[in-house]
Amino acid sequence: MERFAYRPDIEGLRAIAVLLVVAAHARIPGAQGGFIGVDVFFVLSGYLISALLTLEMEKTGAVDFWAFYARRFRRLAPGLLFMLLAACVLAEFAFSPMRQVSQASAAASAAAWVSNFHFAFDDLSYFGPAAESNLFLHTWSLGVEEQFYLVWPLLLLLVFRGRSGGGSDTAARTDRLKIALASVFAGGFALCLWLTVAYPLAAFYMMPVRAWQFSLGALVWLFRPSAGLLRSERLGIFLGWLGFLLIALAAFVYDANAPYPSWRALPPSLGAALVIASGRLVPSKGRRGVFSVSALLSLRFLQAVGRVSYSWYLWHWPILVAGGAIYVQAGLPVRVALALLSLALATISSRCV
């Protein structure tokens, strides 16, 4: 039975994703498209969660839902609730009493992991000027992820077990999963294209519209190659750098003026999928591995950032927003200092909470 081993390249990819998001929100010149780091996180979540669930189903034929949700809660809830409490206290000093009401409402929805609904129904555009005054806007993606965690285990189990509730071999069950998730990918991407034009806020904030990105990560796992595929590590090196290039181009070429997600979400998502797949083809060590993206992503600095990526994502936005409210004309040095302060808080929170 295959085991899901720790992969430093995935930890490093987490670091790249959060660095891009923080750089975009801190308005670092040239990184205006760094918001695509969230798309990278979605693909990563699809890969990791699907891997854990399918391995469990292959071993036991079922999913321990209670254990699955308990693990997610223990990992995600304490840091989120601590940040929400601290940010609400911070709002007392940064905003007027009138503005604190809207902040409290957003905090409550974030605590229930439904802030994506809150912002969609409140007509708050992620790229609009009003977004920069809400301490909790960034929690929309956490709502999307949590809603994904709610439905994904059941979907995979229903497809894996089939109508008979079991009885077919593992290969046939895996084939069913591949077909089902390929259909989710195709249908979800089509829905994304349509809603970006018809209902742009729903396209951006709603989990079903993002399901194709989670499915893409899951398909990378289901079609996972083994090291030495085609007996060529060069293929893995090429795919890895191609994926990294797609992510980088999106981060440095995109801006808030073009409709999103639309088709524009495909290149960074596909880039993340290629980087993840390449990590199985090319080990970060070895004769050719030193030239791979996996080797780059395994650097100590990126490993350290990757370990606190969730916590840094939680803290960076409220610190930047509150800092911007206090220092109205905050220049680049102040914004960088605020981003670093949020990293320090994230490190403390990650270790203590």
Image (cartoon, helix red, strand yellow):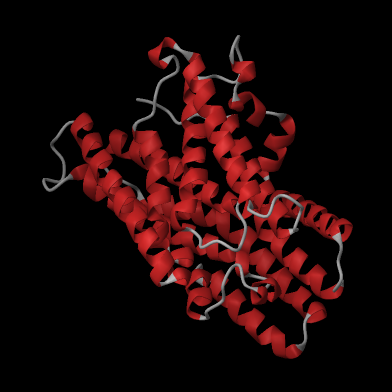
Name the foreground residue: 59 vs 116.
116
Figure check: 195 above or below 269? below
Image coordinates for residue 67, horizontal then vertical, percent: 42, 50
- Asked where in the image residue 103 lies, by quadrant, the reply is bottom right
Q: Is residue 315 left or right of residue 108?
A: right
Q: Is residue 59 left or right of residue 172?
A: right
The residue under the point 58% across, 31% down is 9
Image coordinates for residue 156, horizontal then vertical, percent: 29, 47
Figure check: 112 above or below 72? below
Name the foreground residue: 30 vs 116.
30
Residue 353 can be seen, yes or no: no
The residue under the point 49% across, 52% down is 264
Query: Which quadrant, please, contains the N terminus?
Result: top left
- Asked where in the image residue 66 lies, by quadrant, the reply is bottom left
Residue 182 can be seen, yes or no: yes
Farthest residue to the bottom: give it.
Answer: 98
Image coordinates for residue 145, horizontal then vertical, percent: 48, 57
